[in-house]
Image: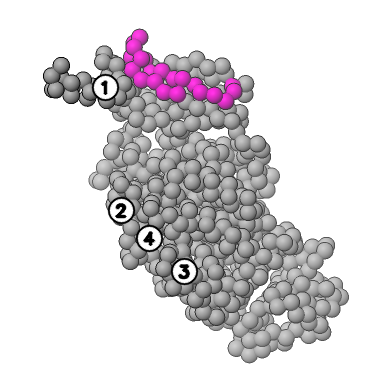
Amino acid sequence: MTKALWGLAVALLCLPQVSIDRPADPLERVEPPFWWAGMHEPQLQLLLYGENLAGLKPSLSYPGVTLLGSETLGNPNYLFINLSISAQAAPGTVDIALLDGERIAASFAYSLRERGSGSAGRRGFDSRDAIYLITPDRFANGNPDNDTVPGMQEAPNRQAPGGRHGGDIAGMQRHLDYIADLGFTALWPNPLVENDQREYSYHGYSATDYYRIDPRFGTNEDFRRFVAAANAKGIGVIQDMVLNHIGDGHWWMDDLPDQNWLNGTGADEITITNHALIALADPYASETDKSQFLRGWFVDSMPDLNQRHPLVANYLIQNTIWWIEFAGLSGIRADTYTYPDPDFLQSWAERVHREYPNFNIVGEEWTRSAPLIARWQRKENGEVTGGRVKSMMDFPLHYALREGLAQDDNWNSGLTSLYQGLAHDFVYPNPQRLVIFGGNHDTSRLFSQLDDDPGLYRMAIAYLATMRGIPQFFYGDEVLMESPKHRDDGVVRGDFPGGWKGDSVNAFNGKGLSGKRKQAQDFVRSLFRWRRDNPVIHRGSLMQFAPHDNTYVYFRYDDEKIVMVAMNKGSEPATVDIDRFSEVLAGKKRARDIVSGNIYPLTRLELPARDVLVAEIY
């Protein structure tokens, strides 16, 4: 044999083992990538993508799994397979063939996994919990090796406020002890799924692959291990999900399944939403305004999904269930919750509730209007109607807190805003289920909004730790991270000190923290660790008293304990008339400051200037 023929033979032997008379397998994607036996809903729809799949016919034989048929769209590269998985189907591998006449054009092995013990009955987060919100790219860089990933469009640039900085899942996992030590029992990271955008991809709200963790954060298995590690430390994980839109770098955008997959498919057809949240509730709203709200794009780089399309709707529903089951989630935060199609939201929320009756979802409706928030919350044990969920973000109280503390006090502002804001609870089906917060990734930093005033900051923290509802705390607020008062996302979502090798300040261990920052961190730790162990705050009654002379007092109480929260916004010490609170004090004579441990007689209440007292009453 000549050297040339020998080289050719070796080359042929090194090729993949593909039949000479059979074309290469055209199948590129199967989503969901696997499923579970024993789910409440028996039907499962698989999205298959690959060249000219639409003309192929699926075939399978597996006990308990029935092929219901297939569906195609305008794009010949998509095939949707409908299955029914009976309660008797056992975990295993379902071999599915795609036939072109009698010839097998493609085939794949589809895994049915065994569900985790107690998966359906998992507890969602509730008022027993306190949530720590993290922007993962800005919290801690636990694995510098994944900062740059071949094939991903945006490389790291820590100097750019809008660039990627390198924080990841490994960084969050490394500091779970820190989060638990602060007293938090739930963790909400901003979205972790792939955002392979040209720029500004760190925040996670422009998905380019719904089934893949962004490699610059880690892998799907890294995320699952992270959730398990958090659970082992008493911390549940809430996944941030976006149902309304994708990023314009999503793989669909190169080859859309259908011309109706999105709301608007060309630049000349795109309409930006009017953000008219009130339109869906407004009895006088025009159909034009409602349509623009629901079908307009959030911004021009975020294509708006058409959830009226049954295959889009089913894809999103199954993706949500998949992540809950795969990762072992304790909750979902639903971004821009009211923007998708209302009928879809009903199907989505009802399906999650049916699979996980004790699970919790918190929806985002960014409005000052309590009735609009109440419209989307369901009763504790009520059926899912109108897409209502157990929890909503309490934006009205968010504004009341920040403005009530920052503004001067008079008959309709300052502390009166807090008092009146809370009084609107009569419109909610269950105010104890609302998620309260002083700041998040879309707002200015709490300390900055309060004019860098330590006294006002302590009042805000005490309020969040003792008020009804489920408190959510934004990473770094415990060490007084700052920002402009106007919205500046890149600065608001700044790097947590100590999250990167070489940081001169390390808030995780206190190295280099100023005395003021250390005191703030200790104050947060004292209050939230105490909150974690006190059911009176989780489910106790609430009574507030109208503000008087720059002071505001409210109580949390049950049959076993009374807690008093007293604020003095004034620049001078204040003496508060204890007799005014006799209906809740019930003759008790002493107060123990839960932060300092000092015990005071309740003959009269002296409040230092610009300070707050949280005390257990005896």
For disc 2, the marked residue is 154
Q: Earlier in the sequence, mark 1 or mark 4?
A: 1
Relative image position of residue 512 (x, y in whole percent): 49, 76
For disc 3, the marked residue is 497
Task: Give the residue furthest to the right.
Answer: 587
Relative image position of residue 141 (x, y in whole percent): 43, 59
* Occupied quadrant, residue 487: bottom left
For disc 1, the marked residue is 13
| Label 4: how many Cα within 10 Å (few below 14, some 14–19, many 20+) | many
Please give left or right for residue 150 compared with residue 180 in the image.
left
Q: Earlier in the sequence, mark 4 or mark 2?
A: 2
- The residue depicted at 66 percent of the width and 70 percent of the height is 526
Q: Amino acid at mark 4?
A: His
Q: Is residue 223 above or below residue 438?
A: above
**How many angstroms separate mark 2 from mark 1 (CA)?**
38 Å
Relative image position of residue 177 (x, y in whole percent): 59, 60
- The residue depicted at 46 percent of the width and 61 percent of the height is 139
Q: Amino acid at mark 3?
A: Pro
Q: Which residues are magenta?
A: 89-109
Q: Are marks 4 and 2 in contact (CB under 8 Å)?
A: no
Q: Earlier in the sequence, mark 2 or mark 1?
A: 1
For disc 4, the marked residue is 165
